Image (tube, helix red, strand yellow):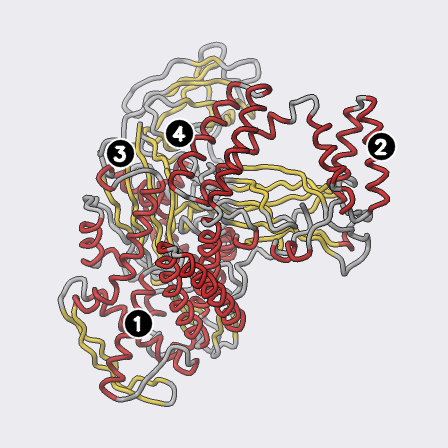
Amino acid sequence: MSTKSLFLGIDLGTTNSAAAMFDGSQVHLVRTTQGATLTPSVVRLDAKGQVMVGAKARRLIEADPDNTRGEFKRLMGTGQPLTFPAAKKTLTPEALSAEVLKALRADVKEQFGFEPSTAVISVPALFELPQSAATSEAARLAGFSRVELIQEPIASALSAGWTSDSEAGSWLVFDLGGGTFDASLLETRDGLLRVIGHDGDNFLGGRDFDWAIVDHVLEKVAQDTGQRFSRNDPSLASGLRKLKLVVEDTKIELTRQTESSVLLPGLALGASTVDVDVTLTRDEVAKLCLPLVDRAIAVCRRLLAAHGLEPEQLSRVLLVGGPTAMPLVRRRLDEVLGVPVGEGVDPMTAVAQGAALYAATAGLDARPPQADEEKGSRLWLQYPAMTPDLAPHVVGRLVEEQGKRPASVTLVRDDGWRSAEATLSQEGAFVLSVDVRPRRPNTFTLEAKGADRGAVAVRPKQLTIVQGLTVNDPPLARTIGVALAYDAVRVYFERGAPLPTKRTFQHETVEALVKGDAGSALTIPIVQGEFERAHLCRKVGALVIRGDALKATLPAGSGVELTLDLDRGGRLSARALVVSTGQVFEQVAQLLVPDASVEALETGLAATRARLSTMRGTAFRLGLTRQIAELGTLEQQLAEVEQDTQAAKGGDADLAQRARRSLIEADAAMEQLESESKLPELEEEAVTAVTAASHWMSRYGTPQEQRLLDEAIAGVERARKAKQVLELQRRLRQVRDLGGAAFYKNPDAWLIEFDWAASQAHEAHDLPRAEKLVAEGKVARGTGDKTTLQRVTQALWKLLPADAQDRKLGHDSGVR
């Protein structure tokens, strides 16, 4: 086994997966036993339960489609069961992903002589929390002891930056994979890669191109044979998987030639058998796929506009993912954006290579723990395995003496350059600055001397620092918060917040929870999304406190301190502390993408269409031309939802999830259109909020807080001029938070708050208790007892009821 550190990166893809190993100087692609650099993300189980993965499994889709599964990445985190009738087994998407990861581990062992214990695995930038958690679970099932996640566009940019000498500038990563599309805006400067922003579509990829072509082929078959077949028929699922496989190969052939054929003689489609022989041209397929490509480009334009950039300000566009090999993609990017496409990046393996480079920056040596055969005193060392700096620091400390104690340490580079000599402190610590050669590994030998200036053996004997492009803390792709009982969201982390991040807020329960009652539970829903209303955000997890787990009964209004923690890969952990008892709950339940049953989809579609019809009538009556146009676009989207729902009847769980997501987005779009009609009202709120915040900040704020408020007010003005309702609401939230912080420095703040709470006391769910508190507060106000006034006011707040309908909309939240 190699004595050098080795860093493993894995691109766990929808259609194909790849792995790469970085040894500090070169990135090596991991090859399969057949010599390929790509492993099809396909798994087959036979009647004996034996597992086959990769190219062999993919070849059997035609012969045995019922027991061969692929494209399960978009179902990660859903818990959707995938059946294998021959083996009489049902596996989750993460279990199937684990089989792909096991195959990649086996390939690493074959090529490098060891089974890796750690790795960096890529995920789409817009993966939700349950999907990231499922990816980590797949790695655990595959035998990895530790993994970190990296967003795919960042990995691609790292790969491009490692091989490029380009100057600082803005990059657009156009990452169109088999199942997902990510657009990321990045900036390189001084050897650092900074992520400016993300956008994308988790249900747009090569898979959708294939189905568009399949539908076209079925239409041609109907014209030739008079037999019509629909994807909403479950009995056709097996035959359609065979057809889609051949269509995918034909699509790939058309990237190199102008004409190809879909040929499947004797294809069984339910009770019928048909001979499929359809000739397709490149232009024909381009026409079918053009709406999907334009959908991806529209995301890019939206991302650029959100950050005030024009396409000509980009220095390069990186194309990543197999579908970007289509001439159509490059042509449309040139026509619409007019930006040069970066060369020298393999779109199929760039993500895996970048993940391996990122593993080096994280110091994730893929080798299993090595037996320490070196002799001498042991040193603990801290240094960047990969850095943009040309003069990084190495920090060390003596942790175990063996033989003569070292008194000083010098680092000697492999070409003879020597650092200054560092004397160990009384605690055995030292710090050294080293010079590194750019864009290459630099190996240093540790030379230690004792107090008598004689040589002393230390371990480790060497360390390696690689100089090159590295990434700063990746940003959070979507806002994360907690749904409250009144259908609002308590934002914990704003979109764009650097990861890792952690935050704590205190909430109050809205109902009593009885000790020992197994039937009572309090739910704290965790949501992702940019909307102020909780029901428009996606529930991605929940922390549940059950009555039978309590040490003591919790009355309504009890304090619960909640901490949310996100690591660099966007994985969530949560902790709830019951303030009165000190009891801690840490188990995050329901960290799953919600189910999308056909019945629920049809009900939701009907309700959404009814709402859209009402809005259209209002828009026509008032002559709202722009709203009429946007509602027309939404009607087209709902037609796609109906098509996906019909296909879901045929067993396509992926399209069911896409329909679910589309319904939520349509609901949110209509919410925004309705809110735009209230823009004048929102602008009035903005004036009031800005005036109040500025008043309190001028009296009680610090200079730093004033600067933050000025930035937030500028954001309010930009959003108001652009009529961006969601952004205006987000900026107003920042203004109110900053103004509130200054307000509570006011000596009379709790007097003002008490007067408001007392005016609402008649609505309290415990009226006698509220009346006593108001009386106590009036006495405290008269005597100037501000401590009691604060306590009374907070107690009154807790007695105010939550509306039942709002609680339902707020994902049945039990906290305010």
Task: Check disc 3 and report the residue beneath it.
Answer: 169
The tag earlier along the polypeptide, 3 or 2, is 3
The tag earlier along the polypeptide, 2 or 1, is 1
* Position of residue 262 measured from the top left corner of the image (x, y, whole percent): 22, 76
Left-right relation of 459 to 157: right
* Position of residue 711 measured from the top left corner of the image (x, y, whole percent): 45, 28
Q: Secondary structure at mark 1?
A: helix
Left-right relation of 716 to 574: left
Q: Which amino acid type corresponds to the residue marked 3 in the rendered image?
A: Gly
The tag earlier along the polypeptide, 3 or 4, is 3
Task: Check disc 4 and report the residue beneath it.
Answer: 463
Q: Secondary structure at mark 4?
A: strand
Q: Secondary structure at mark 3?
A: strand
Q: Which amino acid type corresponds to the residue marked 4 in the rendered image?
A: Leu
Q: Which amino acid type corresponds to the residue marked 1 in the rendered image?
A: Leu
Marks 1, 4: nearer the viewer: 1
Q: In the image shown, does 67 or 304 lie closer to the viewer?
A: 304
